[in-house]
Amino acid sequence: MDYTIIQYPALPSAYSPQKPGRRIDMIVMHSTGGVKTGDLWTLSGRDRRHLVSIHYYITKIGEIYQLVQDKDVAWHAGVSFWQGENDVNRFSIGIELENLNNGRDPYPQPQIDAALWLVRNKVQQYKIPRSRLVRHAQVALPPGRKSDPRAFPWDSFIGQVYTDIQPGPPPPPAPPPPANTVLRTALIDAAYRRARHVYHPDWALHQFAFQQRVGPPLIPPFRFKAEGRDWVAEVYGVDAICSPVGAWTDIRRLSQLPDGELKNVLRSQTYQALGATYHSDWAFHQYADGNPIGVPVTETFRLTLGSGETYTAQIFSLETLITPYGQWDVIFPLSNLLDAPELEARDVELRDTLLTRQYQRIGAKYHPEWAMHQAANKLGLGAPLSHQEQIEMGVQDYVAQSYARDVAYSPVGDWGTVKLLNDLS
Ligand SMILES: [Zn+2]
């Protein structure tokens, strides 16, 4: 039986366009965990909270939809590794099956037949060896992150795919992923999740963020209009970045933008997205415009010490600004108090109050005796962005905490050792 492939194009913002001739030598099978209507909406990039896409989608009654062309890179496997290579989206075709992925939802025969027809075609077209037709659960990093397609009759499916056809030769055996690669991808993935965002190793903005070392993300991406175009912005601990929708290789940093509409709109929207309001005539904000102190993570607030002295302060991601109440021409950064060899009691109180406040902001507690919090102060990592979170890696687990400049992590049980994500290469 022959099938008609229904074209249902994904939005261009949800995949990476490639030139014809992209290397394709792998197929990754998934199940969606959903049903057709919502699946097509999400997989075509229309759900902006989850930027994902897929080449083919097969419904329970055996309809085949194509959302992304084979030559283009769909975003389906996320952080992944197979036979010595990272980021398998680059050279794979992704196929999603409509299935709740709960281990009980069945895959009806018409769906299996359609999948068999499609996969056999692709295996022959691209000479895909048997060891490179895989399930998402086999390639996702860290191991165990994905379970799909659960309960799919895999062995009999593969056997039928390769009945009477000549697959390509098996590739030479490849080494397992280096431990550093696995840990790094797990830390990045977790840092994006903590910001209610999803890491896409293929997405130009995320590659840029990693190369430019702008730190972990703070919030999900948002859209805005400026200079007659639509833009997507992402806010990281060190800087906000933006790119025109659909022109993903054109990426700008807020701190490097020339004065003008784009800078004004991106800056005010970034402040707003972080719960602050930009005032061009405020001394703190003028200071922030001229100094690399990142983005605001609080509004300005007042604080009063035990002695009755009152200050105004605002926490930026890389620095906290302080001014004695009402004396706007005297601005001093908190880092002056962290570096000072000896402090008066008043300054110690001010420093500890502000550090406590930084952790309170995210619902956590400042522990001056913890090696990780000491390292954050000493290395100038800036404001904490998240709680500590356990990263399970099987043999050795870690705890990680996002700071504005970098993600700090320690092996569980070895709390005195604090390392940084940026040093893991
Ligand atoms: Zn999947």
Image (cartoon, helix red, strand yellow):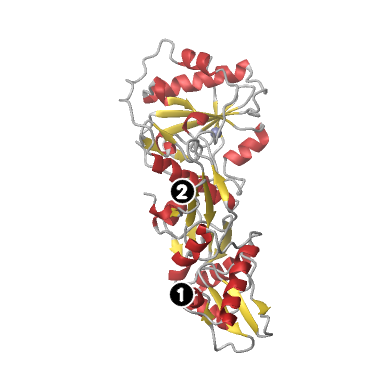
Given residues 14 and 398, the one toward you in this image is: 398
Report the side of 359 relative to 163 (left or right): right
Helix, strand or loop under label 2: loop
Helix, strand or loop under label 1: helix
Given residues 79 and 367, the one toward you in this image is: 367
Query: What amino acid is at disc 2?
Result: Trp
* Residue 352, placed above or below residue 330: above
Report the side of 86 relative to 228 (left or right): left
Query: What amino acid is at disc 1?
Result: Asp
In terms of image quadrants, where is residue 122? top left
- Residue wearing tag 1: 339
Alpha carbons under labels 1 and 2: distance apart: 38 Å
Q: Position of residue 244 (x, y in %)?
A: 49, 58
The extreme top residue here reads 164
Q: Which mark is residue 203?
A: 2
The nearer-to-camera label among 1 and 2 is 1
Q: Position of residue 349 (x, y in %)?
A: 60, 77
* Residue 173, placed above or below residue 74: above
Q: Is residue 281 visible?
A: no
Give the residue drawn at x 46%, y 54%: 418
Q: Position of residue 208 (x, y in %)?
A: 42, 55
Give the residue drawn at x 66%, y 85%: 309
N-terminal-most mark, 1 or 2: 2
